[in-house]
């Protein structure tokens, strides 16, 4: 009888030990996964922001979708105007302009952008959501853009609200993005934290 009681107590101790190890392991694994995936998504968003800024330099507005963005960056060109002289100097009326063109793809390759995978959310089969338009802001017509995705798209098995118990700021329904459709800013919401 004493052996049976000792075996039962040993099994209970092993089960409690296993539960203790898992209760410590899960929050650590969640935080590591969250940090790694967040960094990958932020890096991709910064690449998209760079691509959108290049597009704006060529077209004057932001690209409304990834197909247009990639097409213009592959086949478009930057206009470079070199002004010789001072347009505001009344004593020197001779001003000349020298216009040259540079293929956009050269700049894309120089900064290391991979256009084919630009719209894909890392660790996911999803694509980033992109909107672009113009609006009147402080009596001026400006271009605006917003690109982002929800945390649940790339968090895999941790895409549940229950993991907020390990990080109070975690919300899988929240969006990680840059830009704003209501004002002309390109800042990412990860940059304000």
Image (cartoon, grey):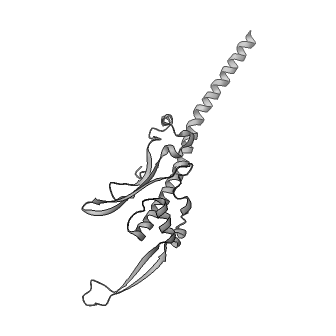
- Residue 190 visible, this orientation: no
Front-most of residues 100 and 110: 100
Q: Which image quadrant is residue 168 in? A: top left
- Residue 29 visible, this orientation: yes
Quarter holding the N terminus is: top right
Residue 156 locus on image (x, y percent): 56, 42
Image height of 168 relative to 40, above or below:
above
For the point 56% across and 44% down, which residue is it? 33
Front-most of residues 188 and 52: 52
Left or right, 32 with respect to 177, comes to: right
Front-most of residues 13 and 57: 57
For the point 27% across and 83% down, which residue is it? 88
Residue 145 locus on image (x, y percent): 39, 58
Left or right, 142 with respect to 170, comes to: left
Residue 130 locus on image (x, y percent): 44, 55
Q: Which image quadrant is residue 49 in? A: bottom left
Image height of 191 relative to 168, above or below:
below
Left or right, 182 with respect to 151, comes to: left
Residue 135 locus on image (x, y percent): 31, 59
Left or right, 183 with respect to 193, comes to: left
Q: Total number of numbered labels?
A: 0
């Amino acid at each position: 009888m004493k052996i049976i009681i000792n075996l039962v107590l040993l099994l209970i101790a092993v089960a409690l030990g296993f539960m203790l190890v898992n209760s410590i392991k899960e929050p650590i694994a969640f935080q590591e996964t969250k940090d790694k995936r967040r960094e990958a998504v932020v890096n991709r968003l910064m690449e998209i922001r760079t691509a959108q800024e290049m597009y704006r330099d060529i077209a004057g507005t932001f690209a409304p979708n990834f197909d247009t963005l990639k097409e213009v960056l592959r086949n478009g060109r930057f206009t470079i105007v070199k002004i010789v002289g001072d347009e505001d100097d009344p004593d020197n009326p001779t001003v000349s302009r020298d216009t040259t063109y540079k293929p956009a793809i050269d700049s894309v390759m120089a900064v290391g952008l991979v256009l084919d995978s630009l719209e894909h959310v890392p660790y996911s089969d999803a694509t980033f959501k992109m909107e672009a338009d113009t609006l009147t802001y402080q009596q001026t017509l400006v271009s605006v853009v917003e690109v982002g995705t929800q945390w649940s798209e790339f968090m895999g098995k941790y895409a549940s609200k229950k993991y907020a118990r390990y990080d109070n700021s975690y919300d899988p329904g929240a969006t990680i993005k840059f830009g704003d459709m209501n004002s002309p800013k390109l800042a990412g919401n990860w940059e304000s934290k």
